[in-house]
Amino acid sequence: MEKRVVFRSAWLPYVLVAPQIAITLVFFFWPAAQAVWYSFHLQDAFGLKTQFVGLQNFAALFRDGNYLTSFKVTAVFSVLVASIGLAISLLLAAMADRVLRGAMVYKTLLIVPYAIAPAVAGVLWAFLFAPSIGIITYVLKGLGVNWNWIIHDDQAMLLVVVAAVWNQISYNFLFFLAGLQSIPKSLIEAAAIDGAGPTRRFWTIVFPLLSPTTFFLLVVNIVFAFFSTFGIIDATTQGGPAQATQILVYKVYHDGVKAADLGGSSAQSVILMFIVIVLTVAQFRYIERKVQY
Amino acid sequence: MRIKILAAALASAGLYSVNAQAQTEIQWWHSMGGALGEALNGLATKFNASQKEYKVVTTFKGSYPESMTAAIAAFRAGQAPHMLQVFEVGTATMMAAKGAIVPVAKVMTDAKEKFDPKAYLPTVTGYYSDEQGNMLSLPFNSSTALFYIDRNKFKQAGVPPTPPKTWKELIAVAEKLKASGQECVYTTGWPSWVHVENFSAWHNVPIGTKQNGMGGLDAQFSINSPLHVRHIAMLSDMAKKGLFTYAGRTNQADAKFASGECAMATISAGALGGVIKAAKTDWQIGFLPYHDDVKDAPQNSIIGGASLWVMGGRKAEEYKGVARFLAFLSQPEIQMEWHTGTGYVPITQAAFDLTKKSGFYDKNPGRDMAVRQLTNKAPTANSKGLRFGNFVQGRTVIEEELEAAFQGKKDAKAALDEAVRRGNEILRQFEAANK
């Protein structure tokens, strides 16, 4: 019983998808093509002089030890954001799934942070943790913690991870909750009758059945950490102290937008583009094989 | 009633459009928010009221990097404004863009507007002039780094409440303040601007070859000299002992001092307004501390802030209006109004003298310190200013390496060597792009 709409007209389907294709071409393919073009050129800020430099922009990047460090920082940041974010949202979703009274209220409150732009989330947490005036700083100082993320690497990383995780929890929560609700109750009840406790039921039945959702979210979260978090970084640490929180996409933004170095910045975004292509291919291959509801 | 209002609205709209047609509009993009933006708009309004031919239209375009990015994008699209306010680190980028800009000196001579380059303060205009002394952009808002102390904290620690003159004295005071229980003893704003750029000028040592980059695009950084290394090592050591609290790369230290958290700070002259408004400190301003065993110290400090660039590709008639406006801005009375209203330094000697004569400095002690420090001695090749290609990236590199030193992750020598190496790569890239 396949549900498929069949068009009799030869051209109508193309007309219907044309706006979407036009948007994709103008806002995705055209800029991407431009980035590739710029990455092979050296140009002054005003675009008065342009010269072809081959792979020189890429060579300069890979010669620079700091750019390679930036990969490591990005990896650490993404793994932390994805793993902490997923763990907390799974816990929240599992708990919200069992709430009987006022479930709507809990769910709504948990979804609210998703409506907040990353840059605003960054400012919010930067205020809470501000070295002189932050309210959490005040509490930490009372506990004897020397809190100053302006100069301490690990604290700066912690700050941006907390802000990014908080921003992304709602999205994860929604998917986990939907995943949990689609697990047949009969399976869980059968296990309960066989004498399995709540913990055992979760790990042997619920968690494996959630795995497609978890995998999808893992990929989405890593992509989020890779690309969408530069607003958080810009509003808080700006990559510092030294380069402790300089993730790849923030360097693209700094070099391209702030420093008007289009060649270097484009080379970096081309590299990022490759990474996201690899990630997407991995996601589709894996999900096509594994997702069987 | 309604018809009457409508008629009035129509009439005034008609009047407005007639005016707009007769007047030549001059677009001015800037980055002055809040009270500073109001002061800037006040200048434009005054100019517009003073004559009928031209109308200066101001547009706030966000932070300095944002308005520069916007202007670059507008230029690429053939719609650049007539005038653009650009921060000092963008100077080399603007200057290299021949064809995108028109030097201010040329704008003034072409329009036959009265223009005497000697009337301007050399330390202020030197920053924005070419090797032949032609003014490329008009300094608009300029400040310098000054040394602030909180006399209350000094008294509590039993130290005579005057600003220490040298770094040796500062450390001695810092130790006493620390011993008296002061948590944040000394802090600084703008680490690269204060401790590398101004530090070099103040001690008359070069920041880079080719007169700090003013003599050509093939300059190299020289901020890893023994004196630089010694100074950064000293600060790192102070940080380790808790005598120096790092506040961040921009003006975060302003609030740390104004709120009474820190006892001493090297921050911008422009921070004074905030310090007075907060009224939490018994502040006093001194010159930047120096190392007294350095022969020429103290020399003079250098400016920070922004200047007005005239963009190319407009009609000659419009440039006449721009010239008229720049001449208007340079008048002593206008400069005095801007200087006393905002805390930025005046750009001409006449304006400084006029402000002095008005008794403003007697009533507001400390407000003349910036000009006095900038004109402490006649500027040398090391203290005239600096001009490095893509210094937006260059300054970030310096700040990253300073942070590594202050964290104790790198020693001062290694950090500054690395800053020079990475900085020079940026300079070579800029040189290649602007050949």
Image: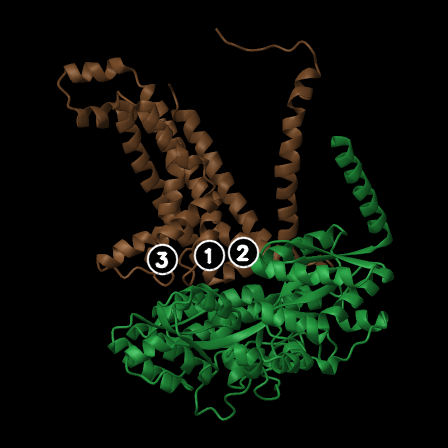
Chain colours: A brown, B green
Residue B7 vertical position relative to residue B275 in the rendered view, above or below: above
What separation in Å lies between label 1 and label 2 (alpha carbons)? 9 Å
Identity of the residue drawn at 34% across and 23% down: A104
Element class at badge 2: helix
Viewer-proximal residue, A230 or A140? A140
Q: Which residue is mark 1?
A: A238
Specify the amino acid type for callout 1.
Gln
The x, y position of residue B155, in whole percent, is: 31, 80
Are callouts 1 and 3 both on one chain? yes
The x, y position of residue B323, in whole percent, is: 79, 67
What separation in Å lies between label 1 and label 3 (alpha carbons)? 19 Å
Report the quarter where the N terminus of chain B lies. top right
Q: Which residue is mark 2?
A: A254
- Rate crowding at label 1 as few (under 14), some (14 to 19) or many (20 or more) other CA atoms within 10 Å: many
Element class at badge 1: loop
Identity of the residue drawn at 62% across and 47% down: A35
- Rate crowding at label 3 as few (under 14), some (14 to 19) or many (20 or more) other CA atoms within 10 Å: some
Query: Disc 1 vs disc 2: which is toward the camera?
Result: 1
Specify the amino acid type for callout 3.
Ile
Identity of the residue drawn at 40% across and 38% down: A168
